[in-house]
Image (tube, rainbow, N blue to C red):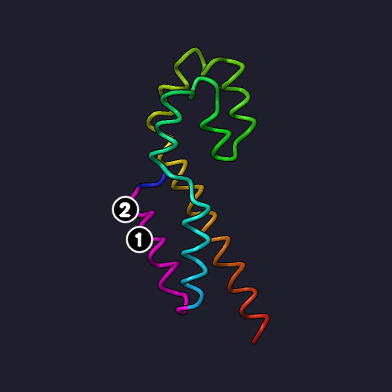
Amino acid sequence: MIASRYYYQRLVKLRDGLDADEKKRFDEFFFSKRKNQTHLFVTSQFVGDYGIDRMALGQPLIGILKLVTLGGLGIWTLVDYFLIGGSARLKNLKMAEAFVAEMRGISHDRK
C-alpha cells in the first residue's frame, strides 16, 4: 500500500501547485470527501466481517465477497486491519489527483 509519509508529501505537492482560490476549493472538497483512516479502522474492527469497511471505500464487490465469506472466516478481516489505512490513503490520493486535474482542466479552458 501507500506509506503515510509519501501520502502527505504528495498531497502537499498537489496543493502547492494551486493558487489561493484553487487551494480553498481543494481544501473544501478534500476535507469533505476524504475517507478518514481512523473511522475506517474502527469500522473494520467492529463490522469488518460483513464487508462494510470495503463498501465504505467504494469497493462493493470486495465488500459483498467479504460478507458472503464472513470476512474469509476471519482471516480476511485480520489482514484488513493492516491494509485498511493504506487503502484509505490510496483512495484519498486518487480522489485529490483527479480533482486537481479536473480543476486545472477547467481553469485552462477559461483562459
Where residue 14 sits, quadrant-wise, is bottom left
Q: In the displayed orientation, state which residue is furthest to the bottom.
A: 111
| Magenta extent | 4-20
Where residue 95 sits, quadrant-wise, is bottom right
Residue 21 position, x and y percent, is 50, 77
How far apart marks 2 and 1 lie (CA) works out to 6 Å
- Callout 2 secondary element: helix
Q: Residues at badges 2 and 1 in contact (C-beta under 8 Å)?
A: yes
- Which residue has dot 1 on it? 9
Residue 69 position, x and y percent, is 57, 15
Number of on-image labels: 2
Going by the numbered disc 1, the residue's amino acid type is: Gln
Residue 18 position, x and y percent, is 47, 75
Q: Say if the magenta span includes residue 7.
A: yes
Going by the numbered disc 2, the residue's amino acid type is: Arg
- Residue 85's place in the image compared with 5, above or below, is above
- Residue 43's place in the image compared with 32, above or below, is above
Residue sitting at x 58%, y 60%: 98
Q: Residues within 10 Å of mark 2 (few under 14, many from 20)?
A: few
Q: Quadrant of the C terminus?
A: bottom right
Residue sitting at x 56%, y 22%: 66
- Residue 106's place in the image compared with 39, above or below, is below
- Which residue has dot 2 on it? 5
Q: In the displayed orientation, state which residue is furthest to the top.
A: 73
